[in-house]
Amino acid sequence: MDRLANTVRPYAWGSTTALPELLGTAPTGEPQAEMWLGAHPGAPSRIDRGAGPVSLAEVIDAAPEAELGADAVRAFGPRLPFLLKLLAAGSPLSLQVHPDRAQAAEGFADEERRGIPIDAGHRNYKDANHKPELIVALTLFDGLCGFRHPAQAADLLEGLGVDDLKPYVDILRASPEEDALREVLTAVLSAEHHAIAGTVERAAVAADQLAAQGGPHADAYAAYAVLAHHYPGDPGVLAAMLLNHVQLQPGEALFLGAGIPHAYLGGLGVELMANSDNVLRCGLTPKHVDVPELLRVVRFEAGDAGVLRPEDVNGEEVYETPIDEFRLSRFVAAPGAAPHALPSRTPQILLCTAGTVRLREAEGEAEAGDGDGAGLALAPGESVFVPAGERITLAGDGTLFRATVVA
């Protein structure tokens, strides 16, 4: 196994304190939004096998079957098909959706055919892959996920007492579910900015007042007021009011499949996703919003947010998703407990998020790590890459997340 050196991305929405507190480093005063663990070309992790630091992506490219295993290469090609992150949101991220694999392939081919530069601000598809995501809360985590039932959205909008919202309320109450959600989202995102900015401001003032009064929608109204504070006049604030507001407790998770509108509002979490950059934005951003393409990708299906909790499988707490490119699980090691053997058929990234976890090569093989014969110890925020076929045991007093594939 190889200890990883990972890059922290300083996006403007990042927390200035959450990642430093986890990593035990001094805050810089600048936002620290995401730490990337994997082989994504945007910020690949680095390892050192004795000849100096080298990109994990380069190591895999040089010998994909040795690093990933024949099964994973056969299923996903000669690349690590997932990207693991520590995500620390200090302010809301953009409201967004991701395409399915067919939509991504079609959109990417179309933009390539039209000669749109890959780094153009109005480009939608950076690759031909889908981007399902799983986020597990490490702290209280605030987010939006999926459409509310239209009647519930109508109640929430009507409760604001803003006359400009009445046409949307009427549509949500009168139309079939999919038609109602599509019509209202289209109207909100297609409106002239100067015409809708005042509506957003009045809705935000009302939401702030209602949040202070308490009641069944107080948390949601407070979240929407925060969105309006960060993005004044943005129609994405009204689009967000169509979505479920959810607060995850530590250990709870959300799976975000293709076409599901969502946004992270605040908190620290472990995120695992397919290795893609394809994002279509609905609002809450100064970046490009392609409304026609967005409406082609969004799934207008109402339901609850679908909070996930891990299921115990022989001591491994697994977050079940319908995706083969990634699989996320958690181990909570206790002092004095017998070492737990990890499966070895697939490549994996192991990330410690609390306490201290000790890793060893299993069954009499030479011990891995720093050359001191004591294995390798991980502190919070530290991680390793384990090639396919390498047998590892874990012990200690801490929490370890395991990212791998289903193969």
Image (cartoon, grey):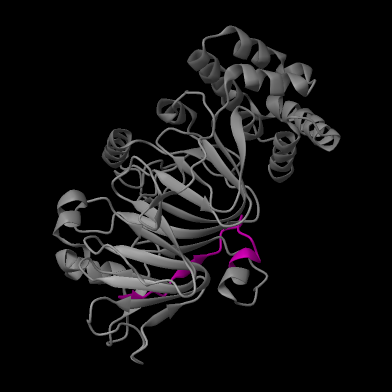
**Position above or below: 288 against 325:** above
Residue extending farthest bottom: 372
Residue shown at 34%/39% (left/top)?
322
Q: Which is more toward the observer, 224 or 267?
A: 267
- Which of the 4 quarters of the picture holds residue 317? bottom left
Task: Please state the horizontal and vertical placement of residue 43, each as a whole percent of the image.
Answer: 40, 65
Please provide the residue range marked out in magenta.
Answer: 1-19
Q: Is 8 inside the magenta-drawn segment? A: yes
Residue shown at 62%/10% (left/top)?
173
Task: Please state the horizontal and vertical placement of residue 3, each as a whole percent of the image.
Answer: 37, 77
> On the picture, is 64 further left or further right than 229?
left
Q: How many marks?
A: 0
> On the picture, is 44 further left or further right than 208?
left
Task: Please state the horizontal and vertical placement of residue 155, each as a whole percent of the image.
Answer: 70, 19
> On the picture, is 196 further left or further right than 150?
right
**Position above or below: 223 against 380:** above
Q: Is 80 inside the magenta-drawn segment? A: no
Residue shown at 30%/82% (left/top)?
368
Residue shown at 76%/28% (left/top)?
203
Q: Which is more toward the observer, 217 or 175?
A: 217
Q: Is residue 232 visible?
A: no
The image quadrant where one finds the N terminus is: bottom left
Task: Please state the horizontal and vertical placement of residue 197, each as a whole percent of the image.
Answer: 71, 30
